[in-house]
Amino acid sequence: MNRAKATNDPSMKNILMGFSGGPSSRAMLQLLHQYTSSHNKYGELKILFIDESLATEDHGDHLGCIQKIAKLYPFELIIKRIEEPMGSKEAFLDAFNGLFLYHLREDFLSSLRHSLLVHTARESKCSMLLLGDSATRIAIKTISLTSKGRGFSLPFEVAAESSCYEGLSIIRPMRDNLSKEVALYNHHTQLYHPSIKSILYKTKPKASIDRITEEFIAGLDSGFPSTVSTIVRTANKLTPSTNLAPGIWCPLCINPAETNISAWIDSIAVRKLTSSPALEASLDTVAELLCYGCRTSWQESKGIALPAYAVNYSEQQKSKRELLRNQIADFLLE
Ligand SMILES: [Zn+2]
């Protein structure tokens, strides 16, 4: 919260906190309460819990536990379901079950989760969105996102503070704390939290890129305790690409995206990635606007149905990109 304090912008009043129910966000909730109790410069504080039980098939009473925790604080609790962006449970399950690889499922959930966080912050008129990524999580994200070809948006996804969306700052106040430190803090302050299982629960260590990275970082960190902080320090030095166009983001993961992905892929690919005429035909619609990581995942998933927000965003993005192209037309080589 020191970082939030330093912002000192009178327009940044309402705060939305993404509360996954995990140890780091549980500690962040407590620290946020302590901080805002003595600093009344913030307006409304809200907590967002995204119920992912439809994907994880974990039917424990986590919602009850989350509600019980939220009642300890004077913050409004907002509950959203991971399937909401897809319109219905059936549409979500069709798309989710159609993804046979774990890393595609992770990417799909991650996009829906991020869109719900940003959308809810806007809907509830919050100009600050707090996420509870610990240093350990930042280290895992740095390696796994790089491996998945998501390096372009990496500086935004691991930054202590990023403002890639107009009027909304995303802040990660827990990013200097190792997961071990968070666990110790929770233990000593007797903060309980539900044990919510992820989709990778019970999977083998090689089930997905995220799972392999988790194992790799945990293994390395037990032998070399400075591993996580070294990766986080390196991630701190990342700066957004100079190709970044303001207001242009991927319609699916809604992270900043490059504008010329198709041309770049064509220049480096030895074969075409598209495998079906239907997929080929649809590339001129939403897919051509996707970032490299989402485009690769989407093609691997044989073009599953995209959530409604992705289709809406793509319409907005098309007109923005058209405008941008017209603005720079005079500088382009024929
Ligand atoms: Zn994307």
Image: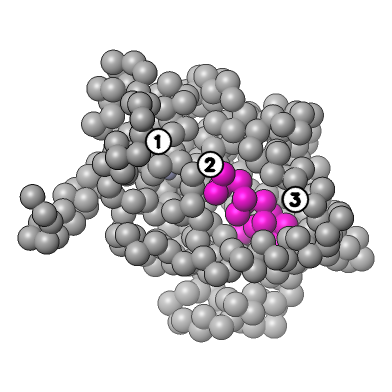
On residue 217, the disc is: 3
In the rendered view, does 4 fall on the left or right side of 243? right
C-alpha distance separating marks 2 and 1: 11 Å
The region drawn magenta spans 130-148
Give the residue type that dot 3 points to: Ile
Q: Nearer the viewer, residue 70 or 93?
A: 93
Give the mark count.
Answer: 3
C-alpha distance separating marks 3 and 1: 27 Å
The x, y position of residue 181, in whole percent, is 83, 64
Residue at image position (43%, 57%) is: 122
On residue 148, the disc is: 2
In the rendered image, the vertical position of residue 43 relative to residue 94, given as above or below = below
In the rendered image, the vertical position of residue 6 relative to residue 146, given as above or below = below
Which quarter of the rendered picture does the N terminus lie within?
Answer: bottom right
- Please tell me how crowded label 2 is: few (under 14), some (14-19), or many (20+) other residues with Cα within 10 Å: some
Based on the displayed image, in which of its 4 quarters is residue 97 positioned?
Answer: top right
Residue topped by disc 1 = 295
